[in-house]
Each structure stands twice: as C-alpha cells, then as structure tokens.
Amino acid sequence: PAILTLLLFTFISQICVALSKLEHHHHRSALNTSAMEKLWIFVLFNFCIFYLLFSSGLDMLQALLEDPNSFRTAFENLDWALYGSFYCNYFLSMALFDCAL
C-alpha cells in the first residue's frame, strides 16, 4: 500500500492533465486550470474529508457505542484541535513546498 500511495501521489498531476486533455481545451492555460481544479478536488477529498471521516468517525462511533443515547456528547468528545492542527499543518506545508497548489 505504501508503494501504491507513493506512485499515486507521484503521478496524480499527470493523471489530472490527462483527464483534462479529454475536455479538448483551446488554450494551454485552460488545460492547466482544469487540471489544477481536479488536483485541488482530489487533495480536498483525500486529505480533508476522508481523513475526518475515518479518524473522527471512528472516535465518534466508539463514543456512541459506549452510550447510544448521547449523540451530542459524541461530537463534544472529539479532539477537534488535533484535526484542525492536521489541516493547518498540511495546507501550510503544501503552500510552502509544493508548487502545484
């Protein structure tokens, strides 16, 4: 899985460009804009939404299994600072070290 993840992140920009070429843009800037939009959607879903669902979802499920009647306290017990710091750290590192975003 680690090698497949590495290959995916190595070639995701080329995959986005290939998908954008299927749209037959008239200008190269429109092609690059479309590819970057696809890459941004991939990054947003992969690192924000799926991470939040799998990490906080498991914590919330555990809290609901302990007390099924307390749906509100399941949200209160989540470590929101941990998830927020992950997002801030990820987006800052992408802004500083990655020219694609």
Image (cartoon, helix red, strand yellow):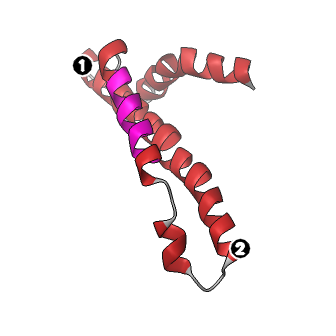
Q: Which residues are magenta?
A: 83-94
- Whether residues under marks 2 and 1 lie with C-beta atoms below 8 angstroms apart, the answer is no
Identified at 51% across, 74% down, the residue is: 73
- As rendered, which of 19 and 12 lies closer to the eye? 12
Is residue 58 left or right of 88 when viewed as pictured?
right
Which quadrant would residue 1 be assigned to in this image? top right
Identify the residue position indicated by label 1 in the image.
29
Judge the density around disc 2: few (<14), some (14-19), many (≥20) Cα neighbours within 10 Å. Answer: few
Q: Secondary structure at mark 1?
A: helix
Q: Amino acid at mark 1?
A: Ser
Identify the residue position indicated by label 2 in the image.
65
Identified at 48% across, 43% down, the residue is: 45
95 up-or-down from 91: above or below:
above
Q: CA distance from mark 2 to mark 1?
A: 51 Å
Q: Quadrant of the C terminus?
A: top left
Q: Nearer the viewer, mark 2 or mark 1?
A: 2
Magenta span main SS: helix
Is residue 23 something that shows in the picture? no
Is residue 50 left or right of 21 when viewed as pictured?
right
Whether residue 91 is in magenta: the answer is yes
- As rendered, which of 80 and 21 lies closer to the eye? 80
Judge the density around disc 1: few (<14), some (14-19), many (≥20) Cα neighbours within 10 Å. Answer: few
53 up-or-down from 32: above or below:
below
Is residue 63 something that shows in the picture? yes
> Residue pushed farthest right?
1
Which of the marked residues, 2 or 1, is nearer the chain's N terminus? Answer: 1
Q: Position of residue 20 (x, y in %)?
A: 41, 27
Whether residue 99 is in magenta: the answer is no
Which quadrant would residue 93 be assigned to in this image? top left
